[in-house]
Image (tube, coloured by chain):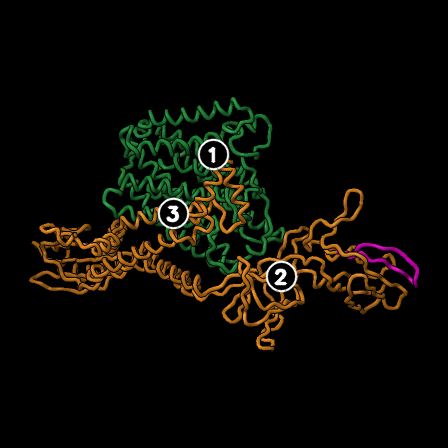
Chain colours: A orange, B green
Amino acid sequence: MMENDAGKKRLSPIDGIWKLFTTVKLAVVLIFLIAMTSVIGTVVEQDAEPEKNIKFFTGVFGDTLAPAAYKVSQAAGFFDMYHSWWFLTLLLLFSANLTICSIDRLPKIHRAVSEPQKPLPPDAFGRHSIKKDFLTEGTFDDVKARTEKLVGKLGFKCADHVEDGSVQFYGQKGRYSRYAVYVVHFSIIVTLLGAVIGAFFGFNGVISIQEGKTADAAWTRQGVEHPLGFSIRCEDFSVQFYGDSDMPKEYMSWLTVMDDGKEVIKNRSIEVNGPLKYKGYTFYQSSYGPVPDAQGLLFFRITPKGAQQSEIVKIRLRESFKIPGTGFVGKTRYFSPALAFGKDGEPFTYTEMMNNPAVFVEYEENGLKKYAGWVAKRHPQTWTLPEGHTVEFMDNWGYQATGLQVRKDPGVGVVYLGCILMTIGLYAAFFTSHRKLWVMVQSEKGKVRVSIAASASKHKVSFETDIDGALKAINREVESG
Amino acid sequence: MGSSEFFGVATIGYVVAMIVYVVYMVFRKENIGVAATTVAVFSFLSHTAAFVLRWVESYRQGIGHAPLTNLYESLIFFVWCLMLGYLIIEFKYKNRHFGAFVTPIAGMALGFIELTGVAKGIQPLVPALQSNWLLAHVTLSFISYAAFALSFAIALMYLIVETKEYKEPAYIFWTLAGGAFFIIVAAMGIDYVYAAVSGQDAGKGLFRATFFNPSSGIAMGTRIAALAGLVLLWRYGHLFKRALGTMDLSSEFLDELTYKMIAAGFPVFTLGGLIFGAIWADQAWGVYWSWDPKETWSLITWLVYAFYLHCRFISGWRGKRAAVVAVLGFITVVFTYLGVNIFLSGLHAYGGVR
């Protein structure tokens, strides 16, 4: 229909859309929409169990409105909104806007950058945003030399142009800073591209491996199994606390990777902020926890009174150990992952986490019951028997599982590249500018006239300050001879 | 003296400086201005000493980390950056009139610390926080927050100077935003004085003496008074304009300075807040971006300032509208910084209030 609109020059729909995508206005609208809609996902809990959000909706909308609001939110994808079709569409439109804006503007910018600077016609001095004009004492050659010094001080490499009795120095600096904004825009596209690569070809999941056990698959958050193609064994896990508190200072796992029946990585330790990488997968220490009803090993270091040598025993619960050279036998009876004593002196377990592992040991001497008590791993004062023998509870192995975050993301390098580009681009965009300078020297009635014309794409004031500063410095040099 | 004593001196000093700067704005007497600057500089030096001492103390306790790891320490560092930035502006432009608008932001941060009972102890670091990226991420984030806070104060002044009509949206906006800002600072002051007079613990929560007073009569009364305050400000806001008008501040200068602050804050925020945060998350958790509320709100803040920067290229958006966006930008910063910790949860939960 539009083609038939004779008489009026109208843009074709494609040109119209193209034109729309070249505008800053569209960018501003999209930025606004992305910012506003992002808020939703921070209020409605993402990827949560339905109960949580049902409770939240009932709290906000009341019993009568909540079901309807919940249904609307579900249809709009609010419960996983950053992956909903409409949010991704917004990001896509934003990327298109950035790209088309840049394609539209780059030729003009390219011209401004590559155009060679020409000497100014004498009457053009005074038309630039920075202009200075003054008469000065001295011979023409003196002033010319001073001017050369001036432009050098300002960091310009100038060409000179001689024309009937006058000389003109001109040069430019930082012209590539005109591209800076586009580097920033491009970096956003690169970063988003990295994210897309990660979303399509990457994997994010978790594995929980009990000490001594082997796993060959990870699980996504939605509970889908993901075979790794190799297997990984947790050799040991340990957690250290700050002083006597239950605040973890450090926790680490020792992992062995087996591929094709061979141990390719042996007993490598990982900790928070220190992951392990193998075949594109990265394993991060992310959590830990107890294994219910675990039947692991208990490690004791036994030192009879006065002995130089210690003996290490590993036993299971309800097994016994001997104190060498004595008639003492200790039988382990109970295990508590986190032992504490109540006000009445009754022992109890205050958490399932291994915050204070302890073993209850019953001692016999030559077959006769002697006494019994708790040996706690974190409390050395519980290790000594009344007779002076020490029974150190060194470790409980096989009782805990290490929680690993597993990630495979071929896009992460691209994201990092985007970040580096963005940093460079922002630096150039905000802290550098394209500066142009022309200085003309000409004789006039026994004196010499100096005319300065200059412009800057940004930070005009600071360029002017620089020029004033350089002029003052030169003047001082002249005065002091 | 330990870090907490030096810090106590700085806190009192900043509050005094705030009052003196406001008095200076009203009476415009040179010696009052000199007094305000003297108090501010003295408090800043004491604050610097407190910061260094706290760092030393953490090593003495065997914990050993820069005092930048929890909400309390970050608020303190924010105030430090803010005052440093402010003093630089005051000396560079030889103009004390910004003081009455900037120091209340410091007052608000300090009031928040005192009134919400933020834990002040030096705490050991959980494993995820034991990273060098932490220092870079937190330091740069708060430097940028301070720059944004300055842009907020200056943009507010711009709006006061530039608006004329009662019905003008920008006028209504600044009376509401500026009014709410000063009412919050005043209500915090009342809370503090009330707690001191009645001998109660101040750190029980915000606005216990006013809007959330256990007595519903006082609560209602103060809420109505606050509303009345907003209406009065709307009615007599031009008096502020007159006060600022006699000062040596052109609106172009204020617009330019707002832009400068944001132009300084934005790249620092992008690098320190977003990029370093992402790198750190990538190394600690294996996800550089997880749409966690703190991350998302940082992105929203970033978008608001990107919005501001682009507004300046659209005809008719420079000036008043851009200033409105600058004010809104800092409100998003405050929400990112405190609101998320209070209302929303996520990976940054260790920045919690208690």
Q: Which residue is mark 1?
A: B15
> Which residue shows up at 67% across the image and 60% down it?
A400
Tell me, yes or no, if residue A86 can be seen here.
yes
- Residue at mark 3 to residue at mark 1: CA–CA distance: 35 Å
What is the three-letter code of the residue carrying label 2?
Thr
Q: Examine the structure image and report whether residue A372 is included in the region drawn in magenta.
A: yes
Q: Which of the two labelled residues, at mark 2 and mark 3, occupies the earlier sequence position?
A: 3
Tell me, yes or no, if residue B13 can be seen here.
no
The disc label shown at residue A154, or none: none
Vertical side of B111 occupied by A296: above or below: below
Q: Position of residue B60 (x, y in %)?
A: 62, 51
Are circles 2 and 3 on residues that touch, CB within 8 Å? no
What is the three-letter code of the residue carrying label 3?
Ala
Mark 3 residue crowding within 10 angstroms, few (<14) / some (14–19) / many (20+): many
Q: Nearer the viewer, mark 1 or mark 2?
A: 2
What is the three-letter code of the residue carrying label 1?
Val
Secondary structure mostly seen in the magenta stretch = strand
Q: Position of residue A253 (x, y in %)?
A: 62, 64
Q: Quadrant of residue A170?
A: bottom left
Are circles 3 and 1 on residues that touch, CB within 8 Å? no
Q: Which residue is mark 3?
A: A35
Q: Examine the structure image and report whether residue B27 is included in the region drawn in magenta.
A: no
- Residue at mark 2 to residue at mark 3: CA–CA distance: 38 Å
Which residue is nearer to you in this view: B110 or A100?
A100
- Residue at mark 1 to residue at mark 2: CA–CA distance: 50 Å
Q: Which residues are magenta?
A: A358-375
Q: Which residue is mark 2?
A: A402
Q: Nearer the viewer, mark 3 or mark 1?
A: 3
Mark 3 chain: A
Which residue is nearer to you in this view: A123 or B33?
A123
